[in-house]
Image (spheres, helix red, strand yellow):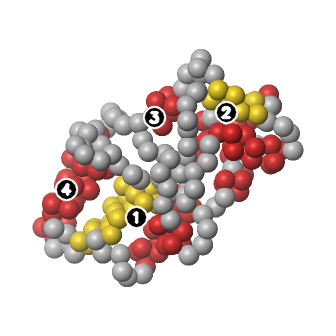
Amino acid sequence: MKHPDDNVRLNQHTEVVHAALKAGVKHLLYTSFAFPPKGQIPTSHVHLLTEQMILKSGIDYTFLRNALYMDFVDVLGLKEAIQSGELITYPGNWLFNSVTRKALALATAVVLTITGHLNQIYELTAPRSWDFSELAEVLSELTGKRIVHRQDSSIQHWIYSFLGKIDTASTSKDMERLMGRPVTPLKESLFTFLQV
């Protein structure tokens, strides 16, 4: 998960934590990434390195580890799939715990406005994962047109390399507990990405 600005981002995060210590900040809330790798921390994992930095600072914390944004479906060629009747993806046992930004915002608002979240880590994901076959089924329901899922190893897109390096499959009920309601279903989440 290496990005050109990783070093810059980590330096910025370091400065913020140091400034918080100097200012006597009592509580830091950090939006991280869901289910980071265990064991030795990769030098490119800015979120996990920042979490460790905050833990070492001694400041009370709350880590909101966000799932993959549902927005990623927008690069999968949904409109092309509707036109052709095929959702074509790179081979793999892909599973997704993605949620909408709106749901993440609601869960975050709860943490910001209600006490009881000191030194807690929340995995903000959907409580169950879905796959590309289910995505094709939902597209069929929404459009009234039969759409099938097919894997093709000739598909070339940066998104699959990115998805292969992160945990998009693990799930948690943290988000639903915080919101006090179910997460937005896949079918409803897709509306925005199908509008012309």
| Cα–Cα gap, marks 4 and 3 | 26 Å
Which residue position holds label 2?
77
Is label 1 or label 4 in front? 1
Q: Decide which of tag 4 and tag 3 comes sooner along the chain.
A: 4
Q: Decide which of tag 1 and tag 4 comes sooner along the chain.
A: 4
Q: Residue furthest left?
A: 22
Q: In the rendering, at what x and y percent does residue 146 appear?
A: 84, 37
Determine whether the residue tagged by mark 1 lies in a helix, strand or loop. Answer: strand
Q: Decide which of tag 2 and tag 1 comes sooner along the chain.
A: 2
Q: Residue at x 51, y 33 (%)?
A: 159
Q: Amino acid at mark 1?
A: Tyr
Decide if residue 47 is in sight here. yes
Determine whether the residue tagged by mark 2 lies in a helix, strand or loop. Answer: loop
Q: Residues within 10 Å of mark 2 (few under 14, many from 20)?
A: some
| Cα–Cα gap, marks 2 and 1 | 32 Å
Residue 164's tag is 3
Q: Residues within 10 Å of mark 3 (few under 14, many from 20)?
A: few
| Cα–Cα gap, marks 1 and 4 | 18 Å
**Horizontal arrangement in the rendering, residue 189 relative to residue 26 (left or right):** right
Image quarter where the N terminus lies is top left
Which residue position holds label 4?
53
Contact flag, marks 1 and 4 (Cβ < 8 Å): no
Which residue position holds label 1?
122
Decide if residue 46 is in sight here. no
**Horizontal arrangement in the rendering, residue 146 relative to residue 131 (left or right):** right
Q: Amino acid at mark 3?
A: Gly
